[in-house]
Amino acid sequence: MYPMPTKAELQTFLRTRRSIRRFKADPVPASVLTDILHTATFAPSAHNRQPWRFMVMIDSSAKKHLSDAMAGEFQRDLEKDKLPLEEITKRVNKSRERINSAPVVVILCVDMSEMDAYPDTRRRKAEYIIATQSTANAGMQLLLAAHAEGLGGVWVCSPMFAQDTVQKALNIPKSWEPQAMLLIGYPVEIPAPREKKPLLEVTKFL
Ligand SMILES: Cc1cc2nc3c(=O)[nH]c(=O)nc-3n(C[C@H](O)[C@H](O)[C@H](O)COP(=O)(O)O)c2cc1C
């Protein structure tokens, strides 16, 4: 038997995780960063193929390069939506600032190259979805491992809207498809819990 937290401790741990969006400037020690990434790789995955890949940035020039590249695409998308220029500038600057001010930025990617290949669209689509579900498991496990270290993190979906831009900006291997960005660091504050739907609204028992 492994040393285990009690049920009450584990529930408290899981229920006190928050999406953290503002970070202290303190760096995350390399050993802590390695530990949380390592823990993420213990997530369950379809066929145990472990299709998750992590592109990790701590260097501020790499983050700036990414945030500049993403800002360009974000700006073009918002212009297409015909938002007022002032609003576009505000949103683009906020997005850039969030990336630049996070001590650690992880681009979470999925790699399909070791997943099963199917000749038909239906099964190809299913296989792709189970690979992305597996990758999301690793992302969630990474956020929980960060929480266990007193770190905070947030899942940011913007790379899904700028996959090619992110891949090119960071010279990410071709088979690694960006799925999300995880921003990680020591929290400035712990926000109040977000409202959660009542269990019975999202569950049916048969
Ligand atoms: C798939 C996914 C995409 C998300 N995208 C963003 C995002 O782009 N920006 C952001 O600030 N938070 C994002 N979040 C975080 C959610 O806003 C957050 O989980 C939700 O509001 C509940 O808050 P909590 O995590 O503190 O419980 C995302 C979360 C998930 C799971």
Image (cartoon, rainbow, N blue to C red):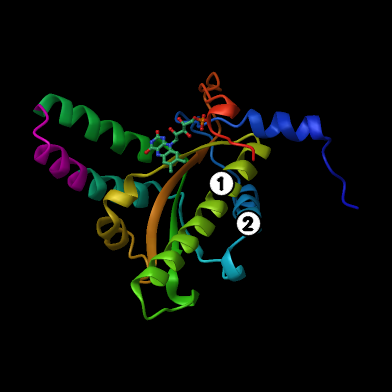
Classify 10 Å Cα crowding around label 1: few (below 14), some (14-19), many (20 and above): some
- Where in the figure is residue 7, as x and y percent of width and height? 81, 34
Classify 10 Å Cα crowding around label 2: few (below 14), some (14-19), many (20 and above): some
The residue lying at 84 percent from left, 43 percent from top is 4
Q: Quadrant of the C terminus?
A: top right
Three-letter amino acid code of the residue under disc 1: Met
- Where in the figure is residue 121, as x and y percent of width and height? 34, 72
**Residue 75 part of the magenta segment:** yes
The answer to which of 196 and 30 lies nearer the viewer is: 196
Q: Is residue 35 left or right of residue 94?
A: right
Most distant residue in the bottom direction: 119
Three-letter amino acid code of the residue under disc 2: Ala
The residue lying at 36 percent from left, 35 percent from top is 98
- Where in the figure is residue 62, as x and y percent of width and height? 36, 52
The residue lying at 45 percent from left, 31 percent from top is 21
Q: Does residue 51 sit above or below 182 in this rendering?
A: below
Q: Is mark 1 within 8 Å of ligand 1?
A: yes
Most distant residue in the front direction: 206
The answer to which of 26 and 15 lies nearer the viewer is: 15
Q: Is residue 140 left or right of residue 6?
A: left
Secondary structure under badge 2? loop
Is the C-beta separation of discs 2 and 1 under 8 Å? yes
**Majority secondary structure of magenta residues:** helix
Q: CA distance from mark 2 to mark 1?
A: 9 Å
Q: Earlier in the sequence, mark 2 or mark 1?
A: 2
The range drawn in magenta is: 72-84
Q: Is residue 12 left or right of residue 176?
A: right
Residue bearing the label numbered 1:
140
- Where in the figure is residue 90, as x and y percent of width and height? 21, 27
Residue bearing the label numbered 2:
43
